[in-house]
């Protein structure tokens, strides 16, 4: 009986939420993205990319999360040394992973993102001015060139974030991790920082607009020292990072 009442209550909440989603949140999300994208361009010119990234990224993400509403709990923040640069790798369940990482990770970083996102009004131009890395996944040589060109900015506490699966997971379990993130860690000589995001799939499932409010957890794991790894055992480094992330999902 309790379970039946729970399902009925969720259905009622879903129905009530729909007008809010279409009439309030989606218009807000569009307008805020355009506004903060334009503001980021101005702030890059007037200040610096790090401050512009905080305002145009972290503030934008938190406002959109609160408007959803999505509430985020963070564990393991003590594992970050803000003076250290990292290659950050995270699982990818939903577009809301971007809000979680940008809004709550608390470090300066550059995204590695697909070229198609450059076309989104506001978001694309803002990300470009900050220095985020757009890659053309259909052209491996151009993708490698873009990543190599960005390596000089990953210093002095500025990190780089990859979704090493390359796309969102449809079932919530991380797919195979591609080698690019880990090759970059070796090239730069910096640790890999695994991050697990739990719950965004229920906020906005992949390839849908079935948005719902909810709670999310982000677990920041201890950095992985890359000193024992090289090009010959790069897959082992990717496997270790994936296992750390999956273990937290299963818990």
Image (spheres, rainbow, N blue to C red):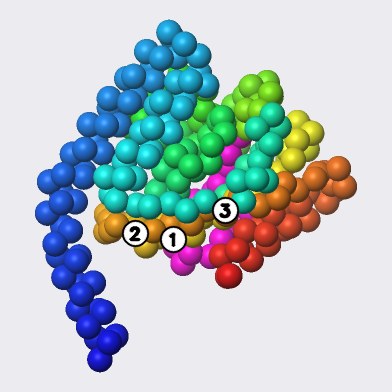
Who's the residue at 24% across and 35% down the image? 30
Residue to which mark 2 is pinned = 214
Quadrant of the image containing the C terminus:
bottom right
Foreground mark, 1 or 2, reads: 2
Q: Earlier in the sequence, mark 1 or mark 2?
A: 1
- First to last magenta residue range: 160-178
Query: Would residue 1 be visible to someone looking at this image?
Result: yes
Quadrant of the image containing the N terminus:
bottom left
Please tell me which residue lies in front, 102 or 205. Answer: 102
Please tell me which residue lies in front, 164 or 44. Answer: 44
In the rendered structure, does residue 86 fall within the stretch colored magenta? no
Residue to which mark 3 is pinned = 75
Q: CA distance from mark 3 to mark 2?
A: 17 Å
Residue to which mark 1 is pinned = 199
Q: Are marks 3 and 1 in contact (CB under 8 Å)?
A: no
Q: Is residue 182 above or below residue 85?
A: below
Q: Are marks 1 and 2 in contact (CB under 8 Å)?
A: yes
- Under tag 3, what secondary structure? strand
Who's the residue at 29% across and 51% down the image? 69
Q: Is residue 4 above or below residue 189?
A: below
In the rendered structure, does residue 175 fall within the stretch colored magenta? yes
Q: CA distance from mark 1 to mark 2?
A: 8 Å
Foreground mark, 3 or 2, reads: 3
In the rendered image, residue 49, in percent from the top left (x then y), is placed at: 50, 18
Query: What kind of secondary structure does the magenta stretch mostly adopt?
Result: loop
């Amino acid at each position: 009986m309790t379970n039946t009442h729970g399902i009925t209550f969720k259905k009622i909440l879903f129905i009530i939420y729909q007008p809010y989603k279409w009439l309030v949140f989606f218009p807000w999300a569009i307008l805020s993205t355009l506004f903060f994208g334009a503001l980021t361009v101005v702030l890059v010119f007037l200040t610096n990319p790090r401050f512009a990234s905080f305002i145009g990224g972290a503030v934008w993400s938190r406002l959109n999360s609160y408007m959803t509403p999505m509430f985020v709990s963070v564990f393991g923040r003590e594992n970050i040394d803000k003076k250290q640069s990292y290659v950050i790798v995270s699982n990818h369940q939903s577009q809301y992973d971007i809000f979680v990482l940008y809004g709550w990770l608390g470090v300066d970083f550059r995204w590695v993102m697909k070229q198609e996102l450059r076309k989104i009004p506001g978001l694309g131009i803002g990300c470009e001015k900050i220095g985020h890395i757009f890659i053309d996944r259909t052209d491996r040589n151009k993708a490698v060139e873009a990543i190599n060109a960005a390596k000089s900015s990953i210093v002095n506490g500025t990190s780089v974030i990859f979704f090493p699966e390359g796309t969102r997971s449809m079932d919530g379990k991380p797919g195979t991790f591609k080698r690019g993130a880990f090759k970059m860690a070796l090239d730069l000589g910096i640790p890999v920082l695994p991050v697990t995001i739990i719950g965004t799939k229920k906020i906005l499932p992949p390839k849908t607009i079935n948005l719902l409010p909810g709670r999310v957890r982000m677990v920041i794991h201890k950095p992985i020292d890359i000193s024992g790894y090289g090009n010959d055992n790069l897959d082992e480094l990717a496997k270790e990072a994936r296992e750390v992330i999956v273990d937290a999902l299963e818990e």
